[in-house]
Image: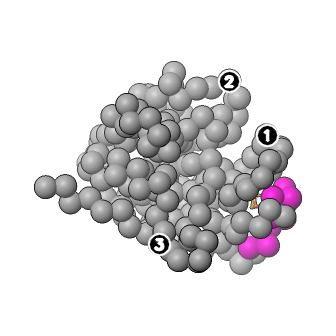
């Protein structure tokens, strides 16, 4: 029987010193900052492009489609939720058009601080935006990089499809699951 049930992972609150960040101008679009979610001390850090909403229009907590598919793949790969921390290239969800490259380059300093602070053992960048931003190469493609590990910015890193892509195109889900299984296998090796 399938025991999987998506749930709201605890939010890692934004440090007080960063709460009013206006560095890139995206704050003008009105979405709130989301620093990360899951276990901040987890050995595996997952990097997405930007956070989806954690609340619906009425302010009720919700688990968006990206989170549901991410959690399912992690669960089916045998990863425990306590082993995972999720964060983003952008800490705010863009609502309207914005200067993508410039904004991502500016917001990356928050992620760099998080990496130095958390020192995760493994990183997984999900989707082309996260991969291109973190690897600092706009030509890269998940399709070509997935299935391997890379030393990036001093961290042992793999790449995977974005959960939303796998949700919209179900034929990608088995590949996303393989990507999470690769993470689980690598973490198993490090644990011993
Ligand atoms: S997206 Fe990043 S850099 Fe821009 S205002 Fe938000 S936290 Fe600051």
Q: Which residue reaches farthest front?
A: 58
Image coords of residue 57 (percent x, y):
61, 71
List the residue tagged with mark 3: 10
Q: Earlier in the sequence, mark 3 or mark 1?
A: 3
Question: What secondary structure is marked by label 2?
Answer: loop
In the image, residue 59 sits, relative to residue 174, either above or below, namely below
What is the distance, in whole Å, between disc 3 and disc 1 at their CAs? 29 Å
* Majority secondary structure in the magenta region: loop
Q: Is mark 2 within 8 Å of ligand 1?
A: no
Q: Is residue 26 magenta?
A: yes
Could you tell me how many numbered marks the image carries? 3
**Which secondary structure, mark 3?**
loop
Instruction: Give the mark, 2 or 3, whose residue is nearer the N terminus.
Output: 3
- Whole-number angstrom distance, CA of label 2 to CA of label 3: 34 Å
Task: Give the crowd class for mark 1: few <14, some 14-19, many >=20 residues within 10 Å.
Answer: few
Give the image location of residue 1, x and y in percent: 13, 55
In the image, which residues are magenta?
A: 19-27
Label 2 with label 1: CB-CB less than 8 Å: no
Question: What is the x, y in percent for residue 162?
Answer: 51, 41
Badge 2 or badge 1: first in the primary sequence: 1
Q: Which residue is depicted at the point 41% across and 28% down? A: 147
The residue that mark 1 highlights is: 101
- Residue 74, given in percent of the width and then of the height, sits at 35, 50
């Amino acid at each position: 029987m399938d025991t999987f049930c998506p749930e709201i992972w605890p939010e890692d609150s934004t440090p007080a010193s960063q709460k009013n960040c206006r560095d890139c101008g995206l704050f003008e679009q009105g979405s709130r900052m989301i620093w990360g979610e899951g276990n901040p001390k987890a050995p595996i850090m997952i990097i997405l492009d930007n956070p989806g909403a954690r609340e619906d229009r009425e302010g009720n907590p919700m688990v968006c489609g990206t989170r549901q598919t991410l959690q399912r793949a992690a669960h089916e790969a045998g990863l425990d939720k306590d082993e995972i921390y999720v964060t983003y290239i952008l800490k705010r969800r863009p609502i309207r058009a914005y200067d993508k490259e410039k904004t991502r380059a500016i917001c990356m300093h928050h992620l760099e601080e998080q990496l130095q602070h958390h020192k995760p053992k493994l990183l997984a960048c999900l989707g082309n935006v996260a991969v291109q931003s973190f690897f600092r190469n706009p030509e890269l493609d998940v399709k070509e990089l997935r299935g391997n590990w890379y030393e990036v910015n001093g961290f042992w890193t793999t790449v995977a499809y974005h959960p939303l892509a796998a949700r919209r195109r179900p034929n990608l889900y088995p590949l996303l699951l393989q990507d999470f299984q690769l993470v689980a296998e690598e973490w198993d090796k490090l644990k011993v």
